[in-house]
Image (tube, helix red, strand yellow):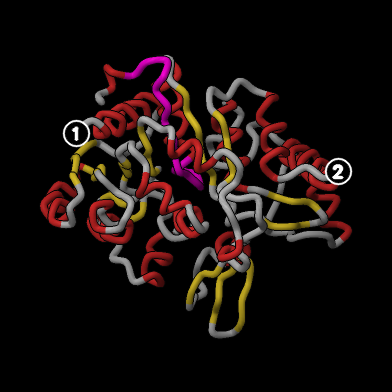
Amino acid sequence: MTTDDLTVSTRVVLLAGGVGGSTFAGGLRDEVRERGGELTVVCNTGDDLWLSGLRLQPDVDSMLYSLAGVKDLRQGWGRAGDSRRVADELAAWGVGWDWFLLGDLDLGAHIARTSWLREGLTPSQAIARLQTRWDLGATLLPMTDTEVDTHVVLDSGRMHFQEWWTRHRARLEPVRFENPGIAASVPAPGVLEAIAGADAILVAPSNPVVSIGPILAVPGLADGLRAASARVVGVSPIIGDAPVRGMADVCLRVAGVPCTAAGVAGHYGARADGGILDAWLIAEEDAAAAASVAALGIASHVEPLWMSDAVRTRALAVAALRAVGH
């Protein structure tokens, strides 16, 4: 399949989490929708947490706001033009984390979600309701309906991933990352069906360890990717041996993965060798790594990977879809 083959029957599945994933999803949505296709995004829920009595789903909401066109592009997360009167009031009462500020509009989404969960809806059903507010041009699915929040294990104890990432900015050296309960989880309704019926499966340039890692750790999900008839194409989150955003280098070091385009490709592995990838997009700055990627049994494609504006982001999405056919 090439991008020119996209028709109304073309079904694209994207595995994604974090800022990079939501940014890439916007360009991909625009390309797929223009060509009459269907996009399903399987979102990481390992970042989820309970805070101030509310269920937060940071990666899901980042994807929701990005596709809705209401994300705060300056900070990369949350709602554009938001205020923080409620957060300030909660801080005055000593409730929640004063370093984890949530905007008023963002809190509205968290309150709505929590209300529906308290009424008996599953996370999948709550997310389905949230996304009806806007014309997203995509269907959002959580990786699982099971609560599998990411914990960071340190020599001194453990903490929630959000505290380690947001408060401490990954400066505390972790021993490992865990998702308690994930071994007993199952893919959310519709996830395996979307993968099995896809014409193209893409892995976003998200953090390989804490964004894509939890998705692949849900029992049956990686097997579904390996059994899919569609080719699986990933986009490197590493450019010039450095993460594009965030502290992914710390996460990779803990996982024993080199912070290079080829290193992450090897981490995912070739589908022909028990991994998940058929092809891997690497940056022009990392063109010298193409041979190393190919040696893994993964087709390498050298492309401009910087998503510095909507035009470049969409061009990257086109390149990823093109790689599905090669």
Residue at the image point whose x is 41% and y is 30% from the top: 12
The residue that mark 2 highlights is 119
Reply above or below: 186 against 81. below
Residue at the image point whose x is 62% and y is 48% from the top: 58
Based on the picture, tell me whether residue 317 belongs to the magenta stretch.
no
Disc 2 or 1, which lies upstream in sequence? Answer: 2
- Tell me the element at label 1: loop
Residue at the limit of the structure toward the bottom, as seen here: 156
Reply above or below: 114 against 318. below
- Name the amino acid type tagged 1: His
Q: Do the residues labelled 2 and 1 touch (CB within 8 Å)?
A: no
Residue at the image point whose x is 38% and y is 44% from the top: 203
Residue 20 visible to the viewer: yes
Q: Give the range drawn in magenta.
A: 6-21
Indicate which disc residue 326 carries.
Answer: 1
Which x, y percent locates residue 69? Answer: 57, 26
